[in-house]
Image (cartoon, grey):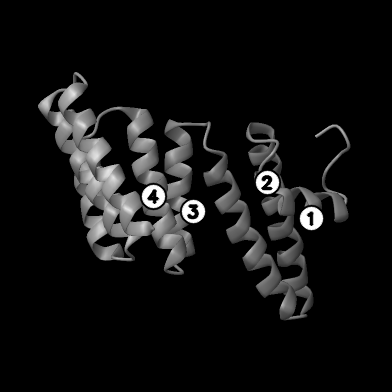
Amino acid sequence: MGNFIDKTFTVIADILLKVLPASKQEKEAFSYYRAGMSAQSRGRYAEALQNYYEALQIEEDPYDRSYTLYNIGLIYGNTGKYTQALEFYHQALSLNTNLPQALNNIAVIYHSQALRAQSLEEDEYLELSKELFDKAAEYWIQALKLAPDNYPGARNWLKVTGRLSDNA
């Protein structure tokens, strides 16, 4: 099924590139972005990153750049490079504040780090885990404001931990 979807996306993208009015530069940037998405979907992260970075060199539109930056963040998150993932999610959000998925992924990273710190059971790590849980909550609340029907697990965690008011 994945191959069918990938091939369908490629065919549709090719048609759009031919039909829609776009500059040569815009088409080239989209071509790199599309190649990055294709490589990413196959787990070829180094190739995907190379294509995304090429797209960023060419792409000028902030909205389009935000999705490229978001996808780079996804790759870094999927490969355990959380600091880099956070950096790229924040860059994406600075260009496009309507990315609840980036806010959710930031929250997931902070929540995961909080659980890890909490497992160490030393006072300094317990305090750190509380701060990280609070950061996760902050980002999940923002994500839920943008996409109220998404992230039911996050909404439940926020309610159970007393971090979500009834009106949110």
Asked whether the beta carbons under mark 1 and mark 4 sit within 8 Å of each other, the answer is: no
Asked if the residue at tag 2 contacts the one at tag 1, i.e. Cβ–Cβ closer than 8 Å, the answer is yes
Is 15 situated left or right of 73 in this image?
left
Q: Which label is found at residue 140?
A: 2
In the picture, measured across the screen, residue 45 lies left or right of residue 127, that is: left
Q: Which mark is residue 1?
A: none
Residue 64: % across, % down: 34, 33
Q: Earlier in the sequence, mark 3 or mark 1?
A: 3
Q: Residue beneath label 1, please?
A: 157
Residue at the disc numbered 4? 71
Q: Total of numbered circles in the picture?
A: 4
Nearer the observer: mark 2 or 3; the answer is 2
Q: CA distance from mark 4 to mark 3?
A: 12 Å
Q: Amino acid at mark 3?
A: Leu
Q: Nearer the viewer, mark 3 or mark 1?
A: 1
Give the mark nearer the N terminus: 2 vs 3. Answer: 3
Find numbered disc 4 in the image and state the secondary structure of the residue it sits on.
helix
Q: Quadrant of residue 148?
A: top right
